[in-house]
Amino acid sequence: VNHLAVVGFGQMGASLAGAWKSGRRILAIDADPAVRRKAAERGFEASDSLDRCALADAALLAVPTREAARILPDVARRLREGAVLLDVATTKAPLVEAYRGAPQVEWVSLHPLAGNERSGIDSADPAMFRGAPFLVVPVRAEEARIAEVEAMVRETGARAIRIGNPKVHDAAVAVTIHLPHVLAYALPHLARETSTDPELAGRSFRDSTRVALSDVRMVLEFLLTGAPRTVEAIDRLTAILGRVREMLARGDEEGLRRFMEEAKGERGRI
Amino acid sequence: VNHLAVVGFGQMGASLAGAWKSGRRILAIDADPAVRRKAAERGFEASDSLDRCALADAALLAVPTREAARILPDVARRLREGAVLLDVATTKAPLVEAYRGAPQVEWVSLHPLAGNERSGIDSADPAMFRGAPFLVVPVRAEEARIAEVEAMVRETGARAIRIGNPKVHDAAVAVTIHLPHVLAYALPHLARETSTDPELAGRSFRDSTRVALSDVRMVLEFLLTGAPRTVEAIDRLTAILGRVREMLARGDEEGLRRFMEEAKGERGRI
């Protein structure tokens, strides 16, 4: 990939553009003139037209998930023969649905597990991928193409982790991303309901609720698009909490210890 | 307080001893000869006998909660007139119960919201209190005494936060400490049940489960001693998760946004 079009130049698009800048021509496509101006100041070509995707070797959808699903056919239709479609959506199901009615271009879906509470080009950081897991979900692509994309992923300093398909991806992130976000919002509500002074928050509460400071629109986007899997994850977690509740209520020290040690072992594998 | 006896020289006892060392005589009381040797190497007097509490201006119980409740009457009985009892138990109810049958010495209960996953004197760090909330729960003490203890708390670099009484304390920490720990253990179990590769854990999952790496005995201690309040917190959280689940299931974007924004505002107060 020598010429990359990045559609949506927010925190993620601009960060990846920065990480992939060296040796590549990168075009920022964004509807917002202020973002385009900032992209130009940072040394990127900028345009407001999806038509410019026609010249690229790869087009990266870096807009919110529902918007990415909406424009996916428009971008796929414009890609030249041999170009590859990329995206960084947190939930893949809406894109898979949109892809069904689009030209069957090569598509390697991506999901960097990086980013912070801020949003927008001003919070972009090309170094944010270093050491982070970066999921590679091939949907329709030759092995050589997948390997090429994985090499690009490693260029950012991230660890490329290949996921079998979008369904596996969506079920996994419901557990590892969406549910922790739901809990991060639920805990402050619990604090408020119980009139608990937030000043009394220890490290565990702070850590568990940090992502509640994220951009609400961004999180709402992936919670809504991933809702069916997140509902399943909530139901399973509620069942596990019910087991803990029973062990606590009857003072089952041995059961609790085993439960905690199993969890500690599983957590230690990260 | 010029002469302090610290009963239990683990991470917390040794860290506080380090923070309070300057200008004070500090005695480490610990049953483990290896711990006493290490305490001596760090410049503290060391003993294995609670009798030595009789000489101190203050005795700090820094052993696990149930052990602290067990020895509280023995320590209270030994304190000289005018000396003050201190403790750093995570749950106060068992100590309050033990205090009922003990000599009514002055008692200011403490709870530093600091510490890390490790345990024992080797992981002690007198700097761990800097900027951390440090709860001060007066049980029976003159205002001048409470003020003196709060000044000691501030000496560690922590923010002294006074809590009305042990019941208010226990209800608050069930929400801000015990429940986040329960969730930190529940999430890895969910990952295992759903065969989710722990490598796919993003920052939110990592942050929310970090305390699952804690010393199991220590956490078990406060979960068991604080069980009634933690069960209540689990029930309330389950109800909140049920509300989120319904909003997700029916795609209630407005309801979710409001829920998230309220939580973000509450979290922002920390």
Image (cartoon, coloured by chain):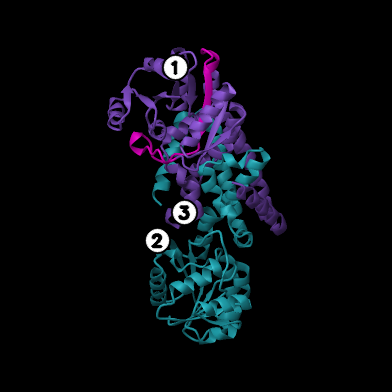
Chain colours: A purple, B cyan
Residue B214 percent location from the top left of the image: 58, 57
Front in this rendered view, residue A195 or A6: A6
The mark that comes first in sequence, 3 or 1, is 1
For marks 1 and 2, give the CA distance: 50 Å
Q: Which residues are magenta?
A: A99-128
B61 over A267 or under it: above or below:
below
Front in this rendered view, residue A53 or B244: A53
Q: Which corner quadrant of the image does residue B163 belong to?
A: bottom left
Residue A245 percent location from the top left of the image: 65, 50
Kindly report which numbered mark, 2 or 3, lies closer to the viewer in this rendering. Answer: 2
Residue B98 seen anywhere in this rendered image of the structure: yes
Residue B139 seen anywhere in this rendered image of the structure: no
Disc 3 element:
loop
Q: Which mark is residue A75?
A: 1
B161 over A155 or under it: above or below:
below
Q: Amino acid at mark 3?
A: Thr
- Residue to which mark 3 is pinned: A196
- Residue to which mark 2 is pinned: B131
Kindly report which numbered mark, 3 or 1, lies closer to the viewer in this rendering. Answer: 1
